[in-house]
Image: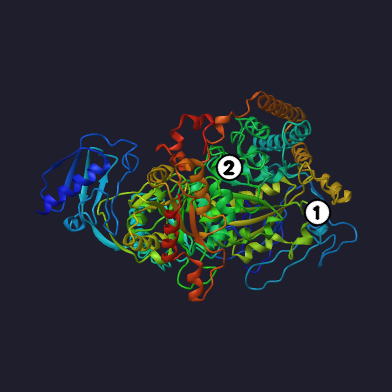
């Protein structure tokens, strides 16, 4: 019975993906093996470019052709299609283990530390303390003090040191205890991390990952509540990604470490305890791709990081009111996945950007410009953009809430945009 | 013979090499040892020394490191003729002051066994000094003829530091520098052609014309840059040293012993990155040497006006590493100190801070009118031109003949001329080069509206694509 349900779900999924499928019988009721008869076309959604195609989401929304929730709740809710670049001919669909987001980051980091001895972590309290958010817990015991380097408090210099190490053969992961502290490292990040590959005429690569928790937390005060993605986005030579689920946290962490480019991985303080099931098998996420959270027809809502959850919460209200929003987690803050975004805009003709960045010069501002430039003719309404207030985040609870976009605002903005045109 | 950085041994505070050596040239403390070197005793037994060296052709002015003060100026406790301060680390031994004439007696011609270089080494050093000087002079010419633009910072006068250190390095060793990096690049082995092409902005330059005067890089020769912001290169050198340490500790590569040298100026010694890296280098015993090229001026800012304690070498022991002051106008003295510091780093004993008293004969850059420095100061240091001095040393000790030196002069002239011709004839970068090195992995430009990676667009490499 379970196998039949599984095969139904798989067939549905495969049809969404536009590939022909034949199911082989499986010994385990929990695993179905897909044989792909055609290689995935590059233009199909996500496959072929990525090492992994995911439909995983905590809310079990699956695709417009997915079977009803109750019929597939056993299978599809946490199901993931894995297409390994080594074996384009087959894919695995299976259940997996559940963990919190910080544990997913930890798992991804651990796998990369195991895989490549030149990978190391450099930052404050990453070693003996296990990381201020426990992302490197237990690693110093396992990998040693040189691979989990506890640094003195000198962000600019240890970031520069990690860059020098990267130029000479290592692959450091630089942890900012809070993303905001990396403002002190801006000199090294902008000048050396971003630009050195270019100014050296391509001689030196800087395969570093800069990661850390940022964003507005619970009354942490202005300096601990910063969003640095807007400050770094202009630096040429940097890639920026923001994780939002345990699944993409692990996948992006691994992809960032393997990338030859310097990548900044933005985590969010309030998302570390999100729980989700992720695959047992190894997977990575594509650094340059966006993630479809909920397909829809009426409006495209582009978001990332913590605001994804405010948007999905607002979506419940919107659905009840009869709207059908398409939610995309852009994930790649620099560069933008203009294909996924464009396909969505062409479908819905309305765009709302919901971000936690500041209004002025934020990611939303750049995204708005990029969409207008590329898809102006597709738009039926001006692009809406909900961002945080241009205010240093106040300590007091009610004030802090006011600086950040809340679900009622999202609902109101969608209603307003959908009334136009 | 090697004179090493001595620890306090039996309460002795040594002031110069000669007091460590007996009359027969053998180290007193090392009489038990088969080789002549003084072992650094114990872990943090540091002693900062004012290293004079044995065979300098200079007179007393060479040890007066504050001799460049302008008339009427007198800094705290300073004054002419005050030659030496040596402070022992740790348990409060007294600093001993000696006057310069006491310390450095007029030099008799050195006996053959006391010569610091062989003939081959001497010729190599001379050639490198001349290459640096001639190249920089040619840069000035080319700049004024409109062949190169922007900011060009010339190294004339400081050649002894570059040659003294870098000629002792292996190809695998690393060097970082500041914007005054042409000669560091040349000493490290980057061909003059590539450096000149880079200055002319041609695609045959060492950085494809993308770096320029202030950003010389060479992966092949271990030159990690060339940085415009001062202090920026010090953490990078620290990172390269960390890689060596990592290779030994984690990757268990016993042969990993690449040393890093960070060159920077007196102005940088007030920068946070300097102190932060001194701390980390000692903490992890990184194989790095911090070389301060103290030429007393940071553009128009005198070292004494910007630094609370102008004796930069003292900042080494504050962070637990030896701090050395050396006469940076004398290539042999620099070389002796460098030998010891490099050996120390290579055997894993950690970092060293070396302050070289030196001087730039030209302005800060070719755009600098250089009005603030007194003619007397300039004349003082011009008289200590490292090339003149070394040439005199070679000839007086009959290591080489005039003809051999002239041959080297001619050879260097030819090399530099050839470099200019090569650079002139080289092509400028074409449009498609613009985007090529922004990302090591060009997928970083992202996915375009058509679903393909932007870098897959043929227009991308032609430089006509939109990004």
Point out residue A273 in the picture as x, y percentages from the top left corner. Answer: 35, 67
Point out residue A381 in the picture as x, y percentages from the top left corner. Answer: 47, 49
| A139 with respect to B1 (left or right) | left
Mark 2 crowd level (few <14, some 14–19, many ≥20, 10 Å Cα): many
Q: Quick check: B53 above or below B427?
A: below
Residue annotated with mark 2: B223
Point out residue B261 in the picture as x, y percentages from the top left corner. Answer: 60, 49
Mark 1 crowd level (few <14, some 14–19, many ≥20, 10 Å Cα): few
Q: Quadrant of residue B40?
A: bottom right
| B157 with respect to A84 (left or right) | right
Residue annotated with mark 1: B105
Q: Quick check: B370 above or below B349?
A: above
Q: Earlier in the sequence, mark 1 or mark 2?
A: 1
Q: Chain of mark 1?
A: B
Residue A226 vs residue B425, the one in the foreground? A226
Instruction: Give the structural element (helix, strand or loop) at label 1.
Output: loop
Q: Quick check: A83 above or below A388?
A: above
Instruction: Give the structural element (helix, strand or loop) at label 2.
Output: loop
Point out residue B198 in the picture as x, y percentages from the top left corner. Answer: 64, 34
| B362 with respect to B256 (left or right) | right
């Amino acid at each position: 019975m379970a196998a039949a349900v599984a095969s139904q779900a798989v067939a549905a999924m495969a049809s969404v993906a536009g590939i022909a499928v034949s199911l082989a019988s499986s010994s385990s009721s929990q695993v179905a093996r897909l044989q792909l008869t055609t290689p995935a076309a590059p233009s199909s959604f996500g496959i072929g470019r990525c090492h992994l195609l995911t439909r995983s989401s905590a809310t079990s929304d699956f695709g417009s052709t997915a079977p009803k929730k109750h019929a597939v709740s056993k299978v599809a809710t946490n199901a993931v299609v894995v297409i390994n670049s080594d074996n384009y001919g087959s894919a695995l669909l299976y259940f997996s283990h559940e963990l919190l987001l910080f544990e997913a980051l930890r798992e991804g980091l651990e796998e990369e530390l195991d895989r490549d001895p030149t990978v190391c972590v450099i930052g404050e309290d990453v070693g003996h303390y296990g990381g201020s958010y426990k992302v490197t817990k237990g690693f110093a015991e396992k990998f040693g003090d040189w691979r989990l380097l506890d640094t003195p408090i000198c962000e600019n210099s240890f970031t520069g040191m990690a860059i020098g190490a990267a130029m000479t053969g290592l692959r450091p992961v630089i942890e900012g205890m809070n993303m905001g502290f990396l403002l002190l490292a801006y000199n090294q990040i902008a000048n050396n991390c971003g630009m050195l590959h270019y100014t050296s005429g391509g001689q030196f690569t800087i395969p570093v990952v800069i990661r850390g928790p940022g964003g507005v937390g619970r009354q942490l005060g202005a300096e601990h509540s910063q969003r640095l993605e807007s400050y770094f986005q202009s630096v040429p030579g940097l890639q920026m990604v923001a994780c939002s689920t345990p699944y993409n946290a692990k996948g992006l962490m691994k992809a960032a470490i393997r990338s030859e480019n310097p990548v900044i991985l933005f985590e969010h303080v309030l998302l570390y305890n999100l729980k989700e099931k992720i695959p047992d098998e190894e997977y990575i996420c594509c650094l340059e791709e966006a993630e479809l959270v909920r397909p829809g027809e009426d409006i495209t809502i582009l978001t990332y990081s913590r605001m994804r959850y405010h948007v999905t919460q607002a979506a419940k209200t919107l659905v009840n009111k009869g709207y059908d929003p398409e939610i995309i987690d852009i994930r790649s803050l620099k560069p933008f996945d203009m294909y996924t975004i464009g396909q969505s805009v062409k479908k819905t003709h309305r765009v709302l950007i919901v971000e936690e960045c500041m209004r002025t010069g934020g990611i939303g501002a750049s995204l708005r410009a990029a969409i207008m430039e590329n898809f102006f003719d597709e738009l039926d309404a001006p692009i809406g953009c909900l961002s945080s207030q241009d205010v240093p985040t106040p300590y007091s609870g009610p004030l802090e809430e006011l600086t950040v976009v809340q679900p009622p605002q999202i609902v109101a903005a969608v209603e307003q945009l959908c009334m136009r045109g | 013979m090697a004179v090493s950085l001595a620890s306090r041994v039996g309460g002795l505070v040594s002031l110069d090499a000669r007091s460590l050596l007996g009359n027969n040239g053998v180290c007193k403390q090392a009489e038990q040892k088969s080789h002549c070197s003084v072992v650094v005793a114990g872990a943090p037994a540091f002693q900062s020394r004012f290293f004079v060296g044995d065979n300098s052709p200079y007179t007393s002015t060479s040890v007066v490191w504050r001799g460049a003060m302008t008339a009427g100026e007198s800094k705290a406790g300073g004054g002419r003729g005050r030659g030496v301060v040596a402070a022992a680390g740790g348990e409060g031994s007294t600093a001993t002051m000696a006057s310069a004439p006491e310390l450095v007696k007029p030099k008799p011609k050195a006996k053959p066994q006391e010569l610091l270089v062989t003939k081959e080494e001497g010729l190599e050093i001379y050639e490198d000094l001349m290459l640096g000087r001639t190249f920089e002079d040619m840069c000035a010419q080319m700049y004024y003829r409109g062949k190169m633009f922007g900011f060009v910072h010339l190294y004339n006068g400081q050649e002894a530091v570059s040659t003294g250190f870098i000629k002792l390095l292996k190809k695998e060793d690393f060097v970082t520098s500041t914007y005054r990096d042409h000669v560091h690049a040349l000493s490290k082995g980057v061909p003059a052609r590539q450096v000149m092409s880079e200055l002319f902005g041609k695609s045959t330059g060492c950085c494809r014309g993308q770096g320029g005067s202030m950003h010389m890089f060479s992966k092949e020769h271990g030159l990690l840059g060339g940085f415009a912001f001062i202090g920026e290169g010090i953490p990078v050198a620290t990172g390269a040293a960390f890689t060596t340490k990592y290779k030994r500790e984690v990757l268990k590569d016993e042969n990993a012993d690449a040393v890093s040298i960070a060159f920077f100026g007196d102005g940088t010694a007030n920068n946070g990155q300097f102190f932060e890296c001194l701390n980390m280098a000692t903490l992890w015993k990184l194989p790095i040497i911090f070389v301060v090229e103290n030429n007393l001026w940071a553009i128009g800012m005198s070292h004494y006006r910007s630094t609370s304690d102008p004796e930069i070498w003292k900042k080494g022991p504050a962070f637990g590493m030896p701090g050395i002051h050396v006469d940076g106008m004398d290539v042999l003295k620099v070389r002796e100190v460098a030998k010891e510091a490099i050996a120390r780093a290579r055997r894993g004993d950690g970092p060293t801070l070396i302050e070289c008293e030196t001087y730039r004969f030209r302005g800060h850059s070719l755009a600098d009118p250089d009005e603030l420095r007194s003619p007397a100061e300039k004349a003082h240091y011009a008289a200590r031109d490292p090339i003149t001095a070394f040439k005199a040393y070679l000839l007086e000790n009959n290591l080489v003949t005039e003809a051999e030196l002239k041959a080297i002069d001619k050879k260097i002239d030819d090399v530099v001329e050839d470099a200019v011709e090569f650079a002139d004839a080289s092509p400028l970068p074409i449009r498609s080069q613009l985007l090529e090195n922004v990302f090591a992995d060009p997928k970083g430009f992202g996915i375009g509206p058509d679903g393909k990676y932007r870098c897959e667009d043929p227009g991308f490499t032609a430089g006509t694509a939109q990004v």
